Amino acid sequence: MPIATPEVYADMLDRAKAGSFAYPAINVSSSQTLNAALKGFADAGSDGIIQVSTGGADYLSGPSIKNMVSGSLAFAAYAHEVAKNYPVNIALHTDHCPKDKLDGFVRPLLAASTERVQAGGTPWFQSHMWDGSAVPLDENLSIAQELLALAKAANVILEIEVGVVGGEEDGVEGAIDEKLYSTPEDAIATIKALGAGENGRYLTALTFGNVHGVYKPGNVKLRPEILLQAQQAAAKELGLSDDARPFDLVFHGGSGSLPEEISAAVDNGVVKMNVDTDTQYAFTRRIADWMISGYAGVLKVDGEVGNKKQYDPRAWGKAAEEAMAVRIVEACTALRSAGTHQ
């Protein structure tokens, strides 16, 4: 299917919230990992989200070029073409963008999508993330207001972060402190600043103990009930019933999360969960297995010529893509999106 239109993406998110499931949002940084993500979603019978970070966009432009915009647009153009051959809907997203990179990443990409939409097309990306976790909440929401207006004009959904995800990802680092837990007051401030969809649709990454990086299950102290408290505070502010879920929530820093924590987060309104560390490992672990078990063919050992079929990048690349796709099916199953494609 073609990359999701804005209308299809909105329907994906609506169905996720109504059906109490969430989509894995898979970070990619190459055509191989993009193809692995597409296969994983297709194998799971799940629509999905594929995203690039600032570092991934840099890498996609060429390691010696480091241009986030050209890397992102090249990724999007490739994805728009190859996704046509898969039977699921895929939305494209850009991940964490801090304040100092907005002018070199999100703003020019929004401008490119606006130009495309005005010419009668669809946006390059279906959503972009503004990561204001490193600035005071007032400034975070003020910048979000500006970006939300630009996103609305481009028919794009904005993702924001309220609170701080601990750990580090692509140079954005969060301390492990009380800011790991968003408050009901944060939720109310967000609603007051951005509205409840009338000013443009947005996704909200509230924090409930999330930490980027690699952790064993049980080491990350998540408190999914914080998401419910935020939803209830926002509902009260909007005059809605106590069981309403005004926010479309995003789950960041999920590596090492327990199944029951993931399930509770989805029940409390999470519709998107970022998956990066686990799929990186699945991809690279399979390459390591290939190289170690077949080293005599990969290397020219003892004056021999090796085995081209083993060191051909397509050979080990296919194996790595398959392993990553299997991990994505697992993520779809955990988030209950497997089999939900319509």
Image (cartoon, grey):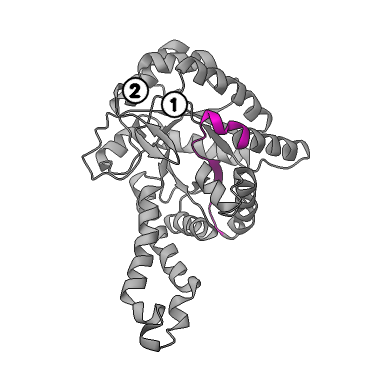
Asked whether disc 1 touches disc 2, contact meaning CB atoms under 8 Å apart, the reply is yes
Q: Is residue 185 above or below residue 249?
A: above
Quadrant containing the N terminus is bottom right
Report, in whole angstroms, how far the alpha carbon at label 1 lies from the one at label 2.
Answer: 9 Å
Residue at 39% of width from left, 30% of height from top?
269
Figure quadrant of residue 266: top left
Q: Read off the magenta span.
A: 86-104
| Residue denoted by label 2 | 179
Q: Residue at x 35, y 51 (%)?
A: 278
Sequence order check: which comes first, mark 1 or mark 2? 1
Residue 326 in view (yes/no) = no
Number of on-image labels: 2
Q: Which residue is mark 1?
A: 133
Q: Amino acid at mark 2?
A: Lys
Q: From the top left corner, tell me how far across and down residue 19 is, in percent.
A: 42, 37
For residue 54, side relative to residue 305 (left or right): right
Residue type at mark 1? Ser
Q: Secondary structure at mark 1?
A: loop
Q: Residue at x 40, y 50 (%)?
A: 338
